[in-house]
Image (cartoon, rainbow, N blue to C red):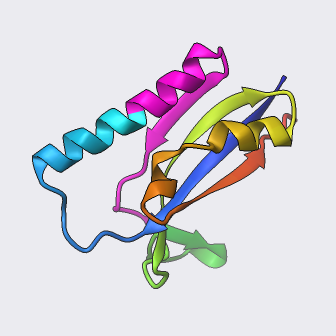
Amino acid sequence: MKEFMLIFRSAQQVEAPTPEAMQAQIKVWQDWIGGIAAQGKFVATNALGGEGKVVRANNIVTDGPYMELKEIVGGYTIVKAANLEEAIQLSEGCPTLSYGGSVEVRDIMVF
């Protein structure tokens, strides 16, 4: 089995959700990831915070991550799948899709 990274993209939230809404969102994510884990295909997951910088050649550091874009990368999950098609199937039902986001599915290269 190969490993694939599911990268979660969504529109940047203008206002923070209520604690109740946040708990509901967490539950939906836990249920979705739990379904992948139950298949023995879960490797790891993390959310990304909003703080960061972008480092370019010649030690140029700019504000980031890419705040000029309307879309942010909010987190990722690494899964095991036989091929890209199976990894795409695992991304189905991802909570970010229910609020207009997208999931980028990428294979992980092993050197």
Q: Is residue 107 above or below residue 1?
A: below
Residue 32 among those drawn in magenta: yes
In the image, 77 versus 98, the foreground residue is 98
Picture quarter containing residue 79?
top right
Residue 14 among those drawn in magenta: no
- Expressed as whole percent of the image width and height from the top left, the position of residue 42 reads 61, 23
- Residue drawn where x is 57% and y is 38% of the image: 77
Q: Split into 4 quadrants, where in the image is the N terminus?
A: top right
Horizontally, is 69 left or right of 43 in the view? left
In the image, 32 versus 11, the foreground residue is 32
Picture quarter containing residue 60?
bottom right
- Expressed as whole percent of the image width and height from the top left, the position of residue 47 reads 42, 45
- Expressed as whole percent of the image width and height from the top left, the position of residue 45 reads 51, 34
Q: Is residue 96 above or below residue 60?
A: above
- Expressed as whole percent of the image width and height from the top left, the position of residue 21 reads 19, 49
Horizontally, is 51 left or right of 110 in the view? left
In the image, 88 versus 50, the foreground residue is 88
Please state the total of marks drawn on the protein image: 0
- Residue drawn where x is 40% and y is 63% of the image: 52
- Judge whether residue 74 can be spotted in this image: no
- Residue drawn where x is 49% and y is 76% of the image: 66
Picture quarter containing residue 91?
top right
Horizontally, is 43 left or right of 49 in the view? right
Q: Which residues are magenta?
A: 30-52
Q: Split into 4 quadrants, where in the image is the C terminus?
A: top right
- Residue drawn where x is 55% and y is 69% of the image: 55
